Image (cartoon, rainbow, N blue to C red):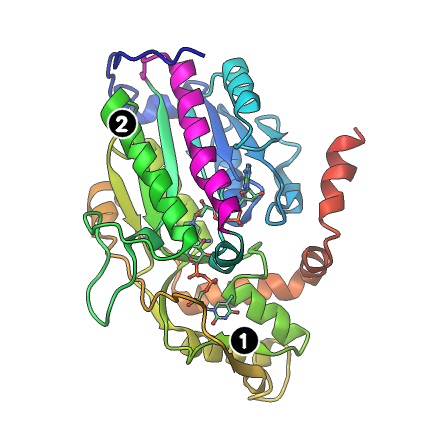
Amino acid sequence: MDLGTKPGRRKDFFNVSYAANHLIMKKILITGGAGFIGSHVVRLFVKKYPNHKIFNLDKLTYAGNLENLKDIEKYNNYRFIKGDVVDESFIFDLFLKEKFDTVIHLAAESHVDRSISMPTEFVYSNILGTVNLLNASRAVWQNDFTGKLFYHISTDEVFGSLGKDGYFTETTPYDPRSPYSASKASSDHFVRAYHNTYLMPVVISNCSNNYGPNQFPEKLIPLCINNIINKKPLPVYGKGKNIRDWLYVEDHAKAIDIISLMGKPGETYNVGGLNEWKNIDLIRLLCHIMDRKLERPAGDSASLITFVKDRAGHDKRYAIDASKIQKELGWKPEHKFEEGLEKTVDWYISNQQWLRNVTSGDYLKYYEQQYEKR
Ligand code: NAD
Ligand code: DAU
């Protein structure tokens, strides 16, 4: 396919006003929409934009679960497409057929521990997958970028690891230290290169650790909740002194909505909760909440804490300076951490079947039942 070599007419995304953004029918592609963050983004967009068509493209890896979207799967403005962003010809055919206006790209391998044991998967999905989407967008938009946007969802891990002080800002140099963060940094570089070289309207946001309902129980918070419910050990890497900045997933989804509407092409926005926790302190707080919710004696859950071998190359501290998105786009987190954590615990306790399905693998049958036998 000829992608052309001349940079085309640059029309600012802002030519389409905020009000018109709601009224003109747009085709919005969200990749990775069956995953943790993606499912919250899909739900927000489907409900908020009845005039737009929301497409959810997902390969349904172990982390993709259509049960996350049961409540909105029958909406007229929603369509699920099963597919792999690494499959170039499939992606080109899809883009030529649907001619999306906006691409919000979340599909990725997302777990650091998995990237340490199988780095190549991360190169395919996270780097090659992103380049395929960029090429397909370019081929379809044909250098007329009016009302078009390619939005890449990235991570704060591209900035590396902080010492005791300081924060990641949008100008912090990239210093990825795990195969996962190296793959995300690489895909960010490609997205920026397409803006610089072809004038494609792109935005990137780099977010801190998310938590909330529907997160696969390989990540710290849902893993601990699941293990406490089942009275299994809570594995704390090293001494539990590493620090993460936690943000409730619905606050991230709202930031993604605002950035997709008002983010300036070529810009990057850091998104974070201004909410740093040492892992061991967070786990102790979680144990305290779980004892109360499960009506177990105080200290019952904390007795499960087990210090284990540290993660290889474990980044010490992440902390986001989110002042740019606050000042320029008016976003700030709505959930206080203790409130968000209570909501999260309540969700997992009331959705233990969801937890059993994802840990047993039964959720993989959902796609078959809902989509393949139609
Ligand atoms: P997740 O692992 O829960 O979901 C990823 C989704 O992508 C899954 O539904 C999976 O099936 C899909 N997917 C994976 N490879 C694919 C491929 N080749 N083709 C099509 N679909 C594919 O991840 P998440 O935690 O929801 O993260 C979503 C995005 O946000 C990722 O890009 C991640 O890097 C980024 N991010 C995550 C966090 C966090 O704390 N979870 C923080 C900042 C940024
Ligand atoms: O910062 C954003 C990133 O946050 C996202 O880009 C990633 O997709 C997401 O997975 C997350 O990465 P982390 O490595 O920070 O998340 P995880 O939940 O795996 O680990 C959080 C911290 O808890 C980290 O310091 C490692 C530690 N940990 C994790 C697990 C799974 C443990 O001590 N024990 C565990 O069992």
Q: Image point 59% across, 49% down: which residue?
A: 63
Q: Image point 62% across, 38% down: which residue?
A: 72
Q: Nearer the viewer, residue 174 or 253?
A: 174
Query: How would you rate the neighbour count of disc 2 (Cα within 10 Å): few for under 14, some for 14-19, many for 20 or more?
Result: some
Q: Position of residue 70 (x, y in %)?
A: 66, 42
Q: Image point 76% across, 44% down: which residue?
A: 365
Image vertical order of residue 2 relative to residue 109, above or below = above
Q: Is residue 322 visible?
A: yes
Q: Which mark is residue 28?
A: none
Q: Position of residue 105 (x, y in %)?
A: 44, 36
SS at badge 1? strand
Image vertical order of residue 289 relative to residue 4, above or below = below
- Confirm whether the magenta stretch covers residue 116: no
User: Which stretch did the figure color magenta?
Assistant: 119-146
Q: Which mark is residue 235?
A: 1
Q: Which mark is residue 195?
A: 2
Query: How would you rate the neighbour count of disc 1 (Cα within 10 Å): few for under 14, some for 14-19, many for 20 or more?
Result: some
Query: What is the spatial separation of the Cα atoms under label 2 and label 1, in whole angstroms?
Result: 43 Å
Q: Image point 46% across, 21% down: which residue?
A: 100
Q: Nearer the viewer, residue 371 or 259?
A: 371
Q: Amino acid at mark 2?
A: His
Q: Main secondary structure of the magenta part?
A: helix
Image vertical order of residue 143 relative to residue 230, above or below = above
Q: Amino acid at mark 1?
A: Pro
Q: Nearer the viewer, residue 326 or 159?
A: 159
SS at badge 2? helix
Q: Is mark 1 within 8 Å of ligand 2?
A: yes
Image vertical order of residue 185 relative to residue 344, above or below = above
